[in-house]
Image (cartoon, grey):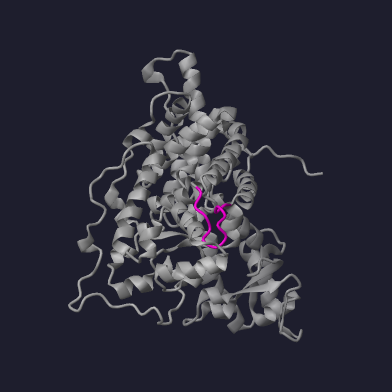
Amino acid sequence: MVAEVDPETLILDGQQRLTSLFQALVSGKPVQTRDAKGKQIARWYYIDMQAALSANGDREEAIRSVPEDRIVRKFGGEPELDLSTRNKEFELCMFPAASIFNAAPWRRDFNKYWNHDHDKSDLYDRFESQVLERFKQYNVPVIKLTKETPKEAVCLVFEKVNTGGVSLTVFELLTATFAADNYQLRDDWRAREERLKKAYPVLRTLQSDDFLQAIALLVTQERRRQAEQAQESEERMPGIGCKRHDILRLTVHDYQKWADRAEDGFVRAARFLHQQKIFRAKDLPYRTQLVPLAAVLVSLGPKGETEGTRQRLARWYWCGVFGELYGGAIETRFARDLPEVVEYVAGGAEPKTVVDSSFAASRLLTLRTRNSAAYKGVYALLMRDGCQDFRTGEPIEAQTFFDDKMDIHHIFPERWCLNAGVDPKVYNSIVNKTAISARTNRKIGGKAPSVYLQSLERDANVDQAGMDEILRSHLIPADKVRADDFAAFFKERAENLLRRIETAMGKPAVRDTDLVPEAVLVQQYDDGPIEWDAEEPVEAEGSSNR
C-alpha cells in the first residue's frame, strides 16, 4: 500500500504539461494519452536523429509516436517501423525520449552496436549538442507563491501569466483555487449543468459564470444580513455583489452551502419562464436576467410561489425586458435587484429596474429580428396572454409550440408587401409578425390575408367568426386584414401591442410617435404600387418570413 503524502507544494497551473513531460521523459513507462477520436491509447516517443539534424527538416516531424509494443504497422498488419529491441533503435538511429535525461547508457550501447563508426559517432555528437543539451538546459519559468498568499492574489497572478492563451474565466480561476482545497468544482458544475439543461430547454444557454454569480449574490446577501444583525457601522457593512472579485472571494464552504439552493433557484426560474410562455433558450429575452431571478426565488423560498408574488415578479421581469436593461455590464443592477425585488414582492417600494424602465412607441417600428430582447418579449407576451393557433384554435402552450414548430412569421406576407410597395422597414417590424406554425405559414405563402384566411377557415373547419376570434387573440384587427388594408391594420395592431406592453410593465409607454403616418407606409413609385394578381402562383416563405 502506498503511504499518503501530505504535499508541501501544489501546482496551480501547468499540471497537464508537467504530467505529459514526466510521462514521456522520466517515467520509463508508456505515455497514457488519447487518439483523435478520444480512444485511450499508450505511446512511446522517439526522436529520429537524422531528421532532427537535417538542415531542411522540421524538428516536430522528427518526433515519432509508436504503440506500446513499439511497432508501427501498415494497414495490412505488416511492420512499417519496428523499434521493439534496443538494437533496432540503434539500427534506425531512433533515440528514445525516455532516455533524454539519462543518455549515457544508450550512447555507450549505440557506439558498440556501430563498432565506434566515425560517421555514427559524429551523428550522435551533433545530436547531443544540438538536441539533447537543449532539452537539459531549458529553464522552465516558475512563479512560487507561499501559503500566506491570499487566494485573490493567487488568481490574479494566475490570470496575468496566462497572456499567451485564451483569457481565463472567473469559473476557471475559481476551479483552480478550489482544487487547492481538494474540491473539484468543474465536476460538480458539469453534473448540475447536465441536470438543468436536460430538463429545461430554456436553460440551455446557462453558463458556469451565471451559476457562480447567483451564488455570490446569495453569499454576500447573507454576509450583509449578519452584519446588520450585529449592528455593524455603515462603513464596515459588506455590500451585496456578484462582480469578479466577489466570486473570487467565495470559499469551498460558501459554494457547498449554496450550490444546491442556487440550482433549485434556476429550476424555479425556468418554471416561472414557462408561466410567461418562454420555453426555449433562443426565445429568452435576456439570459443574464436569469441570475437575479434565480437568486430572488431562492431568497423568497415558499413565498415565491404565491399568486401575488408571481404578479410582482412578472412586472419586474417585463420591465427589465421592455426597458432593455440587462445588456452590457449589469452586475450592479443584479446587486440592487436581489434585495429590492424581495422587498417589493413583500409590499415595499418599486425596484430601480421598474423605476428605470421605459418603452417608447417608436421602438415597435425598429423591432425586426430576434436579436432584440424586446422583440422576443412581444412574442412571449402574445403566447402568455392566450394567442391561439391559426389552424387548431387552441392556445399556444408548450406542446403545441414544440409539436407544430411555432415561430414568428409575417401576417401580411413579405411577397404581398413587396408587390404592394410597402416599405420593408415597416412590414418587417414586429407589428406585422406573430406566432404562426410552420405548417400554417406554408399555407399562407405569399397570398393576401383576404385570400389565405378563407383557406385557413376551410382547413380548420371554422367559420369567419371563429377565425376572427383567433386573430383577435394575436391582437390582429380582423376587419382590417380581411380588407387587405395594411395601413389601417398596422396602426391598430401597433396600438394593441403597445397597450399589452404597458399592461405587462404596469406603467404607460412613451408616446413619441403616432405609430407611423400613412405617408411612410408605402414606398413611392412613379407608376404607383405594383398590382397583385390573386391568381399568380407564389412560393411559401418559410424561414424568410421571420
Quadrant placement of the N terminus: top right
Residue beneath the point at 30% across and 72% down: 420
Q: Where 54 sits versus 253, above or below?
A: below
State the extent of the magenta-drawn residues as a range: 386-397
Q: Where 11 sits versus 391, above or below?
A: above
View extreme (left): residue: 526
State whether the magenta stretch is mostly helix, strand or loop. Answer: loop
Query: Residue 65 placed where, x, y %?
Result: 65, 72
Name the image quarter holding residue 3.
top right
Q: Is residue 378 left or right of residue 127?
A: left
Residue beneath the point at 47% across and 82% down: 56
**Residue 149 in view in this figure:** no
Query: Residue 419 placed where, x, y %?
Result: 32, 75
Query: Residue 511 placed where, x, y %?
Result: 25, 45
**Residue 468 in view in this figure:** yes
> Is 109 in front, or is 464?
464
> Is 259 in front, or is 369?
369
View extreme (right): residue: 1
Instruction: Judge whether residue 63 is colored magenta.
Output: no
Q: Is residue 541 left or right of residue 125?
A: left
